Image (tube, rainbow, N blue to C red):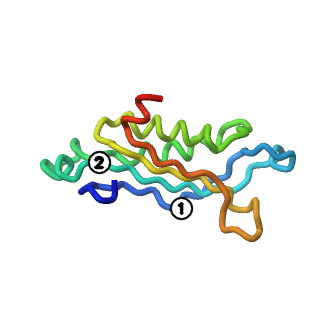
């Protein structure tokens, strides 16, 4: 995707507290996570008619992530990634999406530990 001309919408280092994890120590309270995402669209189509109606709205990205904070405990990061991809691909102009969710304090030696997925629309639609 990086080799082709494209527009990339970015959500960078959004910090939220989620009740998430499989470990017994993760089941009590929320823990900080960091969400990063990139949504890709064809640059040629995107830039042809620049108006508010024709751009990809990035608000659903951060509104989705904010909404996770109100949820009951979820065991797997992949559940959130799956939901994020679903929201992203609701806009037909999104051709691909990269999303990562990192637990910020689970490992002292690391800045974060988690999952990252890069998904093209055609692969998402097959799933």
Residue 51 position in % (x across, y down): 18, 48
Residue 120 position in % (x across, y down): 39, 42
Placement of 14 over or under 39, stated as above or below: below
The residue at the point 17 percent across, 51 percent down is 44
Residue 57 position in % (x across, y down): 34, 45
**Do the CB atoms of the residues marked 1 and 2 lie less than 8 Å apart?**
no
The residue at the point 61 percent across, 41 percent down is 78
View extreme (top): residue: 126
Relative to the observer, which residue lies in front, 32 or 126?
126
Residue 93: mark: none
Residue 41: mark: 2
Is residue 23 found left or right of 14 in the rendered image? right
Q: How many other residues sit within 10 Å of disc 2, few (<14), some (14-19) or many (≥20)? A: many
Is residue 73 found left or right of 12 in the rendered image? right
Is residue 48 found left or right of 67 in the rendered image? left
Q: Between marks 1 and 2, how big is the CA–CA gap? A: 21 Å
Q: Closer to us: mark 1 or mark 2?
A: 2
The residue tagged with tag 2: helix, strand or loop?
A: strand
The residue tagged with tag 1: helix, strand or loop?
A: strand
Q: Earlier in the sequence, mark 1 or mark 2?
A: 1
Residue receiving disc 1 = 13
Relative to the observer, which residue lies in front, 51 or 110?
110
View extreme (left): residue: 48
Q: How many other residues sit within 10 Å of disc 1, few (<14), some (14-19) or many (≥20)? A: some
């Amino acid at each position: 995707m990086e080799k082709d001309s494209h527009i990339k919408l970015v959500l960078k280092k959004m910090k939220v507290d989620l009740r998430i994890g499989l470990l017994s120590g993760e089941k009590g309270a929320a823990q900080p996570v960091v969400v990063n995402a990139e949504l890709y669209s064809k640059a040629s189509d995107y830039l042809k008619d620049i108006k508010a109606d024709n751009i990809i709205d990035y608000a659903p990205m951060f509104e989705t992530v904010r909404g996770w904070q109100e949820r009951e405990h979820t065991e797997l990061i992949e559940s959130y990634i799956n939901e994020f991809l679903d929201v992203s691909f609701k806009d037909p102009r999104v051709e691909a999406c990269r999303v990562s969710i990192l637990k910020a304090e689970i490992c002292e030696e690391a800045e974060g530990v988690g999952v990252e997925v890069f998904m093209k629309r055609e692969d998402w639609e097959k799933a």
